[in-house]
Image: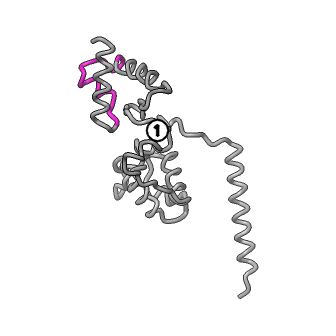
């Protein structure tokens, strides 16, 4: 199949679907090898990355999506209803961070790490579509396993969870020192309380 024809077909599929579509599904629909589809999509990404283009191809792990470039958002909302901007509190961000770096993870695992109940954080993250259920752990009670979603990748502008920033050893030491100073401060506060 001619590459220009293949580009047009892929563009049509992505435009019509709106959501992301797996490369496997595209190759099956077009009866074309996945490697060829991936090569054509890579060429399309370069084409749409040009400054004068208003849309872009975004790869989210093994899925592909056609979407408006971020810099045109202000123009877009003049016509479309402005989407609700979700704000994540510190506790919800903390819960999301643990899920992102430890996935797949159970609710109990997150609560053990945080040391507090995380129902609110999980509910908000599910409501915003930033996390999803990945299945059940093969353990007593069969607890649900959670991980990040494609919406998480889009929101934080990463192609894959492997692209998340890695915490350096220096940062870990800083976090430990900060936690110890907070613990010492709280212990001193308790000792100075008069009964």
**The one of 17 and 89 positioned closer to us in this rendering:** 17
Query: Element type at marker 1?
Result: helix
- Residue 151 appears in view: yes
Q: Relative to residue 21, is residue 104 depicted above or below?
A: below
Question: Does the magenta stretch mainly form a helix, a strand or a loop?
Answer: helix
Splitting the image into 4 quarters, where does residue 194 fall? bottom right
Q: Residue at x 33, y 27 (%)?
A: 23
Residue 67 position within the rendered picture, expressed as x and y whole percent measured from the top left: 39, 35
Q: Relative to residue 149, is residue 195 depicted above or below?
A: below
**The one of 101 and 23 positioned closer to us in this rendering:** 23
Residue 150 position within the rendered picture, expressed as x and y whole percent measured from the top left: 40, 41
Q: Coloring scheme of the render?
A: one colour
Q: Residue furthest bottom?
A: 195
Which residue has dot 1 on it? 72
Q: Residue at x 34, y 48 (%)?
A: 135
Which region shows up in magenta? 20-36
- Which quarter of the image is occupied by the N terminus? top left
Q: Relative to residue 17, is residue 190 depicted above or below?
A: below
**The one of 3 and 26 positioned closer to us in this rendering:** 3
- Which quarter of the image is occupied by the C terminus? bottom right
**The one of 71 and 148 positioned closer to us in this rendering:** 71
Whether residue 135 is in magenta: the answer is no
Q: Relative to residue 75, is residue 191 depicted above or below?
A: below
- Residue 161 appears in view: no
Q: Is residue 129 left or right of residue 188?
A: left
Q: Residue furthest top?
A: 2
């Amino acid at each position: 199949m001619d590459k220009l024809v293949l580009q047009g077909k892929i563009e049509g599929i992505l435009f019509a679907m709106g959501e992301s579509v797996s490369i496997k599904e595209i190759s099956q629909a077009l009866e074309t090898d996945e490697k060829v589809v991936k090569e054509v999509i890579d060429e399309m990404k370069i084409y749409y990355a040009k400054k004068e283009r208003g849309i872009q191809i975004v790869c989210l792990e093994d899925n592909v999506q056609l979407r408006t470039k971020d810099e045109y958002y202000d123009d877009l909302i003049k016509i479309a209803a402005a989407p609700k901007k979700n704000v994540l509190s510190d506790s919800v961000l903390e819960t999301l961070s643990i899920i992102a770096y430890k996935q797949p993870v159970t609710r109990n695992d997150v609560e053990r790490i945080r040391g507090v109940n995380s129902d609110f954080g999980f509910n908000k993250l599910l409501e915003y579509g930033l996390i999803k259920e990945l299945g059940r752990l093969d353990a007593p009670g069969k607890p649900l396993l959670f991980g990040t979603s494609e919406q998480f990748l889009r929101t934080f502008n990463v192609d894959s969870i492997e692209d998340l920033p890695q915490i350096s050893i220096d940062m870990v030491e800083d976090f430990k020192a900060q936690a110890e100073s907070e613990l010492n401060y709280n212990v001193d506060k308790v000792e100075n309380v008069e009964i």
